[in-house]
Image: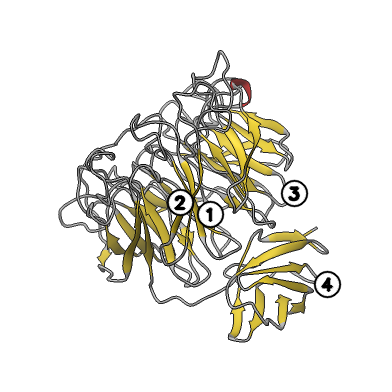
Amino acid sequence: MKLSGLKKACTVFALCAATTIAGRAQDFDTLFRFDGPNGDLPQSSLIQGRDGNLYGTTTAGGGCEIFSLGCGTIFKITPSGTFSTLYTFCPVIVIGCPDGSSPVGGLILANDGSLYGTTEGGGFVGSLCSPTGCGTIFKITPEGTLTTLHRFVFTDGQDLHAGLFRASDRNFYGTTRSGGTYGYGTVFRMTPTGTLTTLYSFCAQPSCPDGGVPQASLVQATNGDLYGTTWEYGSAYGHGTVFKITLQGRLTTMHVFHVIDGAQPFDALIQGTDGNLYGTTSSGGHSGNGTVFTITLGGEFATLHDFCIHPHCTDGFAPFSALIQATDGNFYGTTAGTIYHEGAATVFRMSPSGMLTTLQYFDGANGDAPYGGLVQATTGKFFGTTTRGGYYSVKVCQGIGCGTVFSGDTGLGPFVAFVHAAGEVGQTGGILGQGFTGASDVSLNGTPADFTVVSDTFIRATVPAGATTGYVTVTTPGGTLTSNVPFRVTQ
């Protein structure tokens, strides 16, 4: 599983064989190297803020490097690499850590520019929690003011490895990998003011069809339901599941993994433009080293790619991160490999039919073990993190580096994106992009919308009457920008 400020582990996988197209790219650059005091073990995807900068978390570091556990940070980095630490969490040696400790999951953006996230530990000390607490949910402003919205107790969940997802009802949804009624994790809902409701508790028996230990965040599909994965179980021989859960908490198991079709899915699913769900498994498949898969909303499952580490293979292995679908229609992701296999950590591009191209190899000096996925900024460029490597401070980071932030340019053009990609007529939402100063028109599927240019990188727009689901266009002095995904008009 992923490295943690509290638990650090590597998984070594077996040899395999596969067919892949390799294409070492020359346009990936290291933007920043963590050194321990400014962070260690970044494991989640970055997110673009209203200001056009990127925001992320590190699981450790920020003053805890002498303990090699706990703490963690929230940081901001410009697209050109200027770095600043927004917040440092308290060390786990401080019992309780009321603000939380070790943010493993990523952040999500709200229309007001605030960011929301989770911590693995800290927040509350209870008899059933570890000494560091069960974890927290927090809100932080772009200036670094943090507010703790919820402190978990064991009965409502513990050990948050995933970030949050904000659904169409404007509530936050997430998972815990342990705790709950049976101790094997939960699905929860939290209101914007911090009121938490446990929607589902996964059961404690390996034979339970619902699986257990959900590591990943959730995604809401166009049918309104939430979809996610569990790391373990699903049957006596299962190795995780894909599930659907309604906003009211009714769970349905969509697929049970049995190794040959993949095992131990770790990160979130995404919904592709074709309406199907796509994801990765960190192990399993014919090779034993992870897969890319697709599943329809009706449960029809197919494996698209098997990863391997055979000397003649160039596709890497162990994809722990979620995929993204970029503006060219292709899927992009990372493989984490392990620190024992140089070249096994990669950035890849995969066509919807499963043809894979390796774009970047990590060799340690430029980073290693990219457990987090990629984000495509509205400039068209890609950004990501590596959990290890960089070699900035070998003493603090156990000789292998504290991790990096990297960028990649594959020639894709600029676009606009949404803070929330769904809303009702009359609701106001946020549009992210660049060059907005002097914008003359915002339209949703051809219907003009009222809008306000807040800054050169952010527009506030209202869903117009008569609008239907479709792409948003923004007419700027530099040209017309189109959204990367359709905006869904809800009832």
Q: Report the Cα–Cα distance between label 3 and label 1.
A: 19 Å
Rounded to the nearest whole Å, what is the CA distance between mark 2 and mark 4?
Answer: 35 Å
Which residue is painted at 33% across and 46% down in the image?
35
Q: Nearer the viewer, mark 3 or mark 4?
A: 3
Q: Amino acid at mark 3?
A: Asp
Lower sequence index among marks 2 and 4:
2
The amino acid on which the numbered mark 4 sits, given as a three-letter code, is Gly
Residue type pointed to by label 1: Ile
The outermost residue toward the left is: 311
Residue at image mark 1:
270
Q: CA distance from mark 2 to mark 1?
A: 8 Å
Say above or below: 92 vs 489.
above
Q: Residues within 10 Å of mark 4 (few under 14, many from 20)?
A: few
Percent x, y for residue 411?
A: 40, 77
Q: Which residue is denoted by mark 2 in the rendering?
A: 322
Q: Seen in the image, is 140 located left or right of residue 427?
A: left
Secondary element at tag 4:
loop
Among the two numbered marks 3 and 1 on one chain, the one whose residue lies closer to the N terminus: 3
- Residue to which mark 4 is pinned: 466
Determine which residue is flagged by label 3.
169
